[in-house]
Amino acid sequence: MKNWLPPTIKLALRKKRIPIFIFIVCAVLSCVLSFHKKHETAIMVMGGLLEAQCINCEEFLESNAVDFETYFRPSKLPVLNNKILSQEFLNENYDKKPEEISLPASLTDSPDNTILNYFSILRDAANPVVGRSAGCGTIGDAMAPYPISYQLLSAPFQKNLPYSDYVKTYENILHINLIKYHQVPMEAPQENMVRYFVEIETIEGSAKDTGVFAYYYGFIDLEKEENQYKIRDIHYFGENFLCAPYHGWQWEAEGNVQIRYGEWCKLIKGDIRKSQKDYTIRIEFDGTDGYQYCIVFFQLTNGTDLEVAQYRRISGGSWRPIFIDLEECLENNKKTLQ
């Protein structure tokens, strides 16, 4: 299976002026991420490899017109992982090894069910560590849910992540709320594989004996195994609440599209069209090549807009997922300017 990363984004200084309402400054954002890190240097959290939201800014964002308060507010979205297993089921499987646990087929009979049940099982799990407190006495269901949730991982994933290591990735994670999930296209579609975007809200312990909220977004690949959808891969990205309000980077969907698809790829003809429903933002535009395009973003809890899909309208009016290499556009621009 080909590992996946969100497209690396770089902002280059343009020769001509950028409209002030789009960007006051152009910054450099370069995340060089690898899924093949050595085990001893990799940082894992909640069963997935944790990647940094890399931001390298050349300039400071000086606009006073932006409502920065957006970036300081926690999520007010409803909790979605509410398919809690019965206490009887937990009691029956208490202290069992993962391989001794038999799960109902209904938990993983569809990708949506797998996602919802996985995070529902983990919702009240807690793996506290010494020196970091956030509760009084036993927290939730303590360690009992971990062997159950582990059985929702595919066989190859379990082979790469033994159970003891899996539990360790949940250290200091004391509660999990799933607040967003949505299927997204894969850059290289594979048979029996689907990908989901998720955003989760966690409560974690601190050295100050108080719980703190932390937010992560990520991408989960699921593989169909004998009519059951098991989790094949997880990648999380920690959300930073003090970057966009203080530094200039491309956190806003409209400016993002104007710069990358307009300035870099010379693909935009006329004005762009923006629509938003809940946390999903659609930017549509007519292409200079005669096609129509739609770029989809999800708005994160920290207020930033994350690109998750690109579409081109084909004959008949339907949208087809595509992948435009924006780095190639940027490199071609550099060659043209030389």
Image (tube, helix red, strand yellow):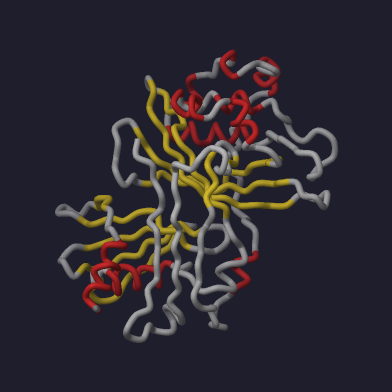
Residue at screen point 64% across, 42% down: 176
From this view, report whether residue 317 is shown above or below residue 175. below
* Image quadrant occupied by the N terminus: top left
Q: Is residue 162 visible?
A: yes
* Image quadrant occupied by the C terminus: bottom left
Residue at screen point 32% across, 84% down: 15
- The answer to whether 14 appears left or right of 219 in the picture is left
Q: Position of residue 36 (x, y in %)?
A: 44, 41
Q: Nearer the viewer, residue 204 or 90?
A: 204
Residue at screen point 59% across, 19% down: 98
Q: How many marks?
A: 0
Residue at screen point 39% across, 66% down: 10
- The answer to whether 221 appears left or right of 189 in the picture is right
Q: Residue furthest bottom?
A: 17
Q: Position of residue 288 (x, y in %)?
A: 18, 70
Q: Is residue 180 visible?
A: no
Q: Position of residue 5 (x, y in %)?
A: 41, 49
Q: Position of residue 159 (x, y in %)?
A: 49, 25
Instruction: Locate residue 225: give its quadrant.
Output: top left
- The answer to whether 289 appears left or right of 98 in the picture is left
From this view, report whether residue 176 is shown above or below residue 232. below
Instruction: Locate residue 302: give its quadrant.
Output: bottom right
From this view, report whether residue 93 is shown above or below residue 129. above
Q: Nearer the viewer, residue 165 or 189?
A: 165
